[in-house]
Image (tube, helix red, strand yellow):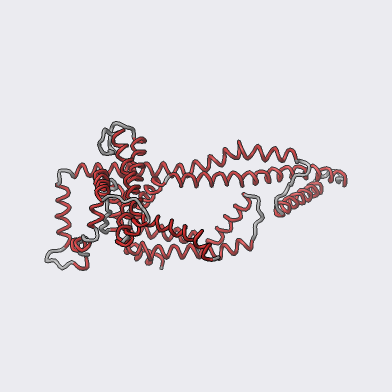
Amino acid sequence: MISSVFRQKIYPFLLASYQWYLRTSERSLDEAYKAALQIKAIENEYFDGNKIDSDSSKYSRSILDYFESDLKKYLKIIRMRLTEFKASRFFLSESHQQAAKHLGREYIHPSLVLEKLKFIDGVIGKYNKFDEFTSETSSKKDNSLTIVPTSTNELEEQNLSDEKLVKKTPPGKTNTTGILPRSIFNTITRLQIELDPKAEQDVVKNFRNAQKRTIISVRFLLLLIIVPILTHQLSKALVVGPIVDRYFERHSEDSVVFLNYEMEEEALSELQRFEERIKFDNLLSNAEPLSTEQIETQLKSKAHEIAEEFRHSSSNSIKNVFADILSVVTFTWLLLVSKREIAVLKDFFDHIVYGLSDSAKAFIIILFTDIFVGFHSPHGWEVILDGISRHWGLPANHDFIFLFIATFPVILDTIFKYWIFRYLNRISPSAVATYRNMNE
């Protein structure tokens, strides 16, 4: 019984999985080759067979951004698949290749593989400096040497050249034992850069990159703020609002006036204050005392007014729930379709944050930590949670609020401390020292 089940179900599945594993190198190379063909097709159709130039005057800025986005996507696919191709060939031994032939897998001639690799190298060799816009900023931020393989030759020779790279890496400040001070060599290097005939072109290019990064980041931030707000308001006024209002009109007699007990207590308290105000005004005036029927008439009119007000507040809370859901969906959709903008925005914030002085960094860290995890932060969190519950028409659960205040600021404080210890202490230790001195 067990052997028959194994032959009928388990063995075919294992065999198919093994065949899929044996085809990994072939599949990776084919996907990289297809991505290279896509890049070549864009070059032939829109750039007359030349490389995709981001500074071309033939197209507008929006069209060039579209081509750059596709180019970056295809280059990423090529690099990932070539890495997978190299790793799969490393782990596939000769016995696996013989097993592949035994299983009837189609044999691929090495000349075809070399032809595909040569074509891929010819395509991506033009774009070795395509990521200069982001690599320059990351190198300034990390102060380290990072080499990204962009062709199969580099993939094959990367492991062999690691020792040479270590030898070529300049020694740190603590390991410098030269006769002359290091600052003199830095000054000479800076003078060489300034006297370089291409220095002006590099400055203009860096400025254009920074300008493009700023424009994309500001535009994306405005989209992240404006689009969800517009979605909330338009959906509330045109879609959700009419549906909820129509429901309340059809069920006006048996519709729920109060969504929670807090709204009911607030309405009763307001009606009670109105009754006391009537009696107080009547006692202060010289008019005749109001009869019980007159007081009841005024209270009944006020009760209908309060009920209508809270019915409108309840319907508005229901509208807010559905409108907020649509806003969150819109915001999530923006994040999913804007991966390139998110990368540029992250680089933009890195330039701003890590470009500040040490005192400014320490000031911002202390400001944020005191607001969100400081001594007076529980009062602010309580106000925020009460406002959210009122916005959605939910009763304010004080046990949940107290539990949230007791745990969430602690988690935020731990994240802040970990970020300071893990990243800021490595990138800017002087800022950490300034922060500790200001915090003491």
The relative height of residue 401 versus residue 69 in the rendered view (above or below) is below
Residue 224 image point, x, y percent: 47, 44
Residue at (26, 35) in percent of width and height: 49
Residue at (17, 49) in percent of width and height: 193
* Nearest to the observer: residue 182 or residue 148: 148
Residue 111 image point, x, y percent: 24, 48
Residue 362 image point, x, y percent: 38, 60
* Nearest to the observer: residue 429 or residue 411: 411
Extreme-left residue of the structure: 179
Extreme-top residue of the structure: 58
Residue at (56, 44) in percent of width and height: 326
The part of the image, by quadrant, that contains residue 303 is top right
The relative height of residue 313 versus residue 375 in the rendered view (above or below) is above
Residue 406 image point, x, y percent: 56, 65
Badge count: 0
* Nearest to the observer: residue 246 or residue 297: 246
Would residue 229 be visible to someone looking at this image? Answer: yes
The part of the image, by quadrant, that contains residue 233 is top right
Quarter occupied by the N terminus: bottom right
* Nearest to the observer: residue 10 or residue 195: 10
Would residue 351 be visible to someone looking at this image? Answer: no
Quarter occupied by the C terminus: bottom left
Residue at (60, 40) in percent of width and height: 236
Residue 336 vs residue 107: left or right? right
